[in-house]
């Protein structure tokens, strides 16, 4: 088993067969369910893994422990991708204590019909668990991403066990850059709870951190400032990079042509641009891009006198995740009644600190000189 820090071993598993995480989120490169063993005078297992991998995980633990028995299983997060095998573990190791907080045990009872009353260790925020040289301090992180979530700081190796925090989509066997799939993971799963993530970052800033162990994605050891900076930006809804993201839905290709034309105009003005087709691309990719850039353009067809469904759902996702602090440009298309610019403004009314561009675009069926001139004016405004 791989030793990731002095006395801490990786015992997680890779899921290369999964297509939809949480039943809804595409994961083309699979998923990792991470778990760790801390070996010391006392041995602790940090979380379990998804239900399909119980046997492999228990074997990994056995191999990491080399004949020792675990004294604790620490349950930082009860979502079943991490807690599904707690009961199996408890059966295999009847002497081991189950460590969680008050809410953890309520959920354990709900999932397994037992709250392990005779062998539980209920911890409070800030409480410590000494294992020998290694010592865990529990740092509660409610709503990152469920109410019972807690993280744990291990002081000997200066390691944070961050629960879902700093996670990313993708199995570990698929080596890929961290940022894109971590951003998509963050905004798909935790994005709504920026204030709670900020609160966790503040609590963790009291500790010197050398390693971050998430429940998903790689163990982070190098350049930690990069990851912490991105988490700080994402959770405070600050833009990550200058530029424009154009999200569009198009039926016969005319709205798409407008989106492409605007992208071309912006690129000529030296603006960084990305485009997302809301019909062909899973919306989680577009949600992540919308939060990455400081400016977004929403281009859509009018459909049944309403916003085209893919765009409507996309906007709902942004609102649900507290979309804010951005400039928004609008392009509407309709053969008999282009109506969406006003409707989109109304949908985004709940979002804080949005600035709508003055030069929005109305297309009647297909681009013409008039609407191309409007796109030009929008490109000018967005490039300032
Ligand atoms: Fe990876 Fe919220 O579970």
Image: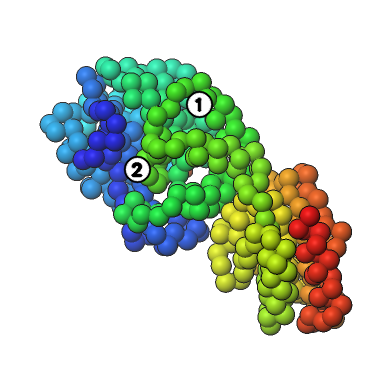
Residue 137 locus on image (x, y percent): 41, 21
Instruction: Give percent across and percent down for residue 279.
Output: 61, 71
Q: Which mark is residue 32?
A: none
Q: Position of residue 45 (x, y in %)?
A: 29, 32
Q: Is residue 274 above or below residue 190?
A: below
Q: Vertical placement of 109 versus 128: above or below?
A: below
Residue drawn at x 37%, y 21% as measured from the top left: 155
Quarter of the rendering occupied by the C terminus: bottom right
**Secondary-structure class at tag 1:** helix
Task: Describe the colour scheme in one phrase.
Answer: rainbow
Image height of 278 relative to 323, above or below: below
Q: Which residue is depicted at the point 69% across and 61% down?
A: 270
Residue 2 visible at all: yes
Q: Which residue is mark 1?
A: 204
Tell which circle, 1 or 2, labels the residue nearer the N-terminal end.
Answer: 2
- Asked whether disc 1 touches disc 2, contact meaning CB atoms under 8 Å apart, the reply is no
Measure the C-alpha gap from mark 1 to mark 2. Answer: 20 Å
How many callouts does the rendering have? 2
């Amino acid at each position: 088993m791989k030793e990731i820090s002095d006395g801490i071993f990786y015992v997680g598993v890779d899921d290369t067969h999964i297509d939809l995480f949480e039943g809804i989120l595409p994961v083309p490169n699979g998923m990792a369910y991470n778990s760790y063993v801390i070996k010391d005078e006392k041995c602790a297992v940090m979380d379990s893994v998804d239900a399909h991998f119980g046997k492999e995980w228990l074997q990994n633990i056995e191999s990491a422990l080399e004949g020792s028995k675990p004294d604790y299983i620490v349950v930082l997060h009860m979502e079943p991708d991490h807690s599904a095998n707690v009961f199996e573990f408890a059966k295999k190791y009847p002497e081991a204590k189950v460590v969680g907080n008050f809410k953890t045990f309520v959920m354990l009872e709900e999932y397994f019909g037992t709250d392990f009353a005779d062998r539980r260790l209920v911890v409070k925020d800030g409480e410590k668990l000494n294992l020998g040289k290694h010592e865990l301090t529990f740092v509660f992180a409610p709503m990152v991403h469920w109410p019972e979530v807690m993280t744990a700081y291990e002081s000997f190796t200066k390691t944070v066990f961050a629960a879902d925090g700093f996670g990313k989509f993708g199995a570990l066997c698929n080596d890929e850059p961290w940022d894109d799939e971590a951003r998509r993971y963050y905004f798909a799963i935790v994005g709504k709870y920026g204030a709670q993530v900020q609160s966790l970052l503040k609590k963790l800033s009291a500790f010197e951190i050398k390693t971050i162990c998430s429940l998903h994605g790689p163990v982070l050891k190098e350049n930690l400032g990069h990851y912490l900076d991105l988490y700080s930006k994402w959770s405070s809804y600050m833009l990550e990079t200058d530029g424009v993201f154009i999200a569009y839905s198009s039926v016969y290709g005319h709205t798409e042509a407008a989106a492409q034309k605007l992208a071309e105009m912006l690129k000529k003005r030296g603006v960084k641009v990305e485009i997302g087709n809301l019909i062909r691309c899973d919306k989680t990719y577009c949600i992540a891009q919308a939060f990455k850039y400081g400016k977004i353009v929403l281009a859509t067809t009018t459909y049944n006198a309403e916003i085209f469904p893919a765009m409507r759902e996309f906007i709902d996702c942004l609102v649900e995740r507290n979309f804010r602090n951005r400039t928004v440009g609008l392009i509407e298309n309709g053969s008999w009644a282009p109506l969406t610019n006003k409707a989109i403004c109304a949908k985004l009314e709940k979002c804080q600190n949005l600035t709508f561009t003055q030069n929005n675009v109305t297309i009647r069926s297909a681009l013409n000189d008039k609407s191309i001139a409007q796109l030009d004016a929008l490109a000018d405004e967005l490039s300032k």
